[in-house]
Amino acid sequence: MSFVLRNISVRHASAKRGDSYQALNEVSVSIEQGEQIALIGPSGAGKTTLLHTLACAHPQVSGELSIFGVSPWKLSHAGRHALRARLFLAPQTPPLPPRQRVVTAVLAGCLPQWNIWQAIASLIRPAYPDAAYDALARFNLQDKLYSRVDRLSGGERQRCGMARLLVSKADAFLVDEPLSALDPMLAQQTLTTLQQEAENRNATLICSLHQVELALRCFPRIVGLRDGRIVFDAPRSEVTEAMIAGLYRNAMQDEQRDVQLAPAPIHVSC
Amino acid sequence: MATLVTLILLWPMLIASEFKPWILLDAQSLDATWGFLSGFFYPAHSREFLLLILEATWQTIAIATAGLTLGLLGAIPLTLLATESMSVSLMETGHMRLSGAIVRQTARWLLVLLRSVPELVWALLLVRIVGLGPTAGVLAIALTYSGMLGKVYAEILESSETHATQSLLKNGGGRLASLMYGALPASASELVSYTTFRWECAIRGSVVMGFVGAGGIGQRMDESMKMLAGGEVATMLIIFVLLVACADMVSTYLRKRLG
């Protein structure tokens, strides 16, 4: 088991003490090592918070969380930080400093494995330019190896952030909307690369997506999240159009239940 | 109305500070000023004087550079202790662990202590301890400047975009390494420009400290002032201007390189 969540409630990362609004509410889910899961749901459903919780980025208010068989928040400070090295969280906006060279930004994925002297040495002279090159090549960015991050386009930055994921030694990839800045062709290509990498090293891949069609086409298991709760958690073959429509119906339609819904047609093919 | 109130409030202060500008226009003062200032033309430029000044200038630059380097040795560790962007517990829960908070606060207090005593005061104290000469100047600059550099470095790092650093921390990167890969690229040129500006200040500071016997061009200037040798003072002032202009050029060059 790579992740087991039992009745997890989480407050928003930026919430003040005493603010009782919960971004995740009594979420229970278990995820096997090597599983590939798409996380879908409307904006503000708690997808990012769930990914952050799985990455031990912030603690739950209540419930039990187990990652690779241990409860991260019962570990020591150092133990928990060592656990984080096995989890790779890729935020939605690529976390790349604009004035850094692409090769350095990609190799930053190796930081958990390096001691401080290796890290400093690699700032001056990149330690494994070949590894960075190979990682970038899988996203067709190999010729950007020595350019600066601020010379990249939005989509290139996003893929550069994914290249960092490839050089990391993580056993679980928690990827937050990796395709938001990519055109449909690149989106498919990028997703395929991510899935192949996860499969090759038997890593768990959890990916939040807004492209429902792509999620249904490429992921065997779909988790639908809404208002901080899991609405459905099913294999792709069991996800129906009505379930998707229910997941995305907006609050206004909630109030006017008599208004007939016209769910967008979904083409499931694979 | 506001002007009137300001004037009424200012008046006692002017009295207390014995602010009497008309003394400047007194015949006797004008005479003395004229005598001193006319001495400024022409600046002294005899060969032996220039050699003497060159050596003193070199000593001043050496005091400033050595002082700043020593200051950096103190400032960098204190910066790393004081800056909040390296706190893992802050990233996790939004507030710091008690132990972390205590260490950070102590580092901050130490920085306040170091920079709240002006370098001139440190120099006066140190001249008593290590005797007249450049050593006192170097140590005085190192003490004050480690406080200033540490504070400003920590603020520069904290005010830079934290997303990159935080993200590396969340992926299990070490604190120092995350800071260097996340925040440093964005802040490097600001850090360098502030450091060269402080180097410029250290040159000025070491001149002032020369007046209390800490060596360098300041000590020479003190002597020339006391002898009312305007020409010599003028030469030294010109050298100051050149030094500051040089520091400015170094800063511009370095920032372009890092741009």
Image (cartoon, coloured by chain):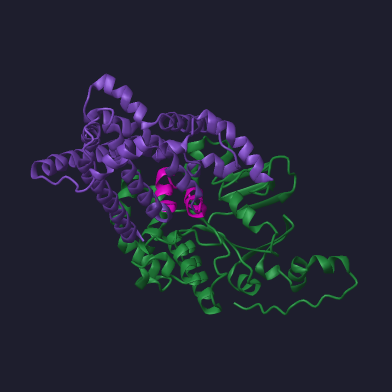
Chain colours: A green, B purple
Answer with left or right where residue B255 lies relative to residue B8.
left
Q: Is residue A77 magenta?
A: no
Task: From the top left corner, tell me how far across and down residue A121 is, in percent.
Answer: 29, 50
Vertical relation: B50 (above or below) A181: above
Start-end of magenta stretch: B161-184
Name the residue nearer the viewer: B149 or B211: B211
Answer whether residue A56 is visible to the viewer in this image. yes
Asked where in the image residue A160 lies, by quadrant, the reply is: bottom left
Taking the view exactly as shown, the residue that stands out farthest to the top is: B129
Labels in figure, total: 0
Asked where in the image residue A35 lies, by quadrant, the reply is: bottom right
Q: Residue at x 55, y 34 (%)?
A: B97
Q: Residue at x 74, y 57 (%)?
A: A227
Quadrant in which the C terminus of chain B appears: bottom left
Taking the view exactly as shown, the residue that stands out farthest to the front is: B27
Task: From the top left corner, tell me how far across and down residue B149 is, in percent.
Answer: 39, 40
Task: From the top left corner, tell me how far across and down residue B167 is, in percent.
Answer: 50, 53
Quadrant in which the N terminus of chain B appears: top right
Q: Residue at x 50, y 54 (%)?
A: B161
Task: From the top left corner, tell me how far across and down residue B107 is, in percent.
Answer: 45, 32
Q: Residue at x 43, y 33 (%)?
A: B111
- What secondary structure is the magenta-colored segment mainly? helix
Vertical relation: A217 (above or below) A30: below
Answer with left or right where residue A193 lies relative to residue B13.
left
Answer with left or right where residue B210 lies relative to residue B198.
left
Asked where in the image residue A107 lies, by quadrant, the reply is: bottom left
